[in-house]
Image: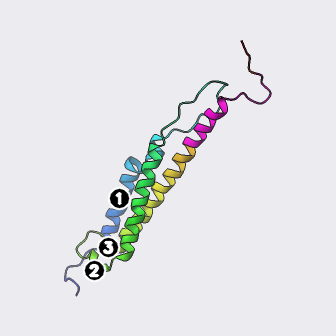
Amino acid sequence: MRSSRTRPAGGSTVCALIALLFVTPFGGGCSFIFVDSPPQRRPRYGEEVECSSVVWPLGDTLVGGYEGYRIASALDASDTAYRGARINRGQDIALGVAFLALFATSAVVGYSRVSKCWSLNDRSSSPSPGTIPLRR
């Protein structure tokens, strides 16, 4: 049975979008914020590049996994479970998908940056092709 109260159409959607726009640049995607890109130049023989930690992409992976769980839970729930909630089931699923996409993309970017940095360090420990290391 429907309540006699009416809400403006899309009111909670607007609030959810404003919250998403506010949260994303400040707290979403740790790897976007904290993992540095590797340098453009190849380090010289014996020189090591300081790499960001893999902890940030791992955190993004965990949050993305939680969002996947949330989406599955929302898909399994009935509309009556959302009675009295600030958002409806469809909005909950949409927000979950948006956050899953954000954190999954951030994790992929973070793992890629860290991996490139590590490979630069692996290559700097062996001489470049055509160079002969000097022995003393």
Q: Which numbered disc, 3 or 1, marks the residue that appears first in the sequence? A: 1
The residue most toward the front is 136
Place of residue 32 in the rendered image (x, y in percent of width and height, measured from the top left)? 48, 46
Residue 94, relative to residue 25: is it above or below? below
How far apart marks 3 and 1 lie (CA) works out to: 16 Å
Say which quadrant the C terminus sits in: top right
Q: Residue at x 63, y 34 (%)?
A: 122
Residue at the spot of label 2: 80
Residue at the spot of label 3: 88
In this orientation, does residue 28 appear? yes
Crowding at dot 2, Cα within 10 Å, few <14 / some 14-19 / many 20+, comes out as few
Residue 111, relative to residue 93: is it above or below? above
Place of residue 134 in the rendered image (x, y in percent of width and height, measured from the top left)? 74, 17
> What segment carries the magenta color?
114-132
Is 78 left, or right, of 31 in this rendering?
A: left
Place of residue 21 in the rendered image (x, y in percent of width and height, measured from the top left)? 39, 55
Amino acid carrying label 2: it is Thr
In this orientation, does residue 29 appear? no
The residue most toward the left is 4
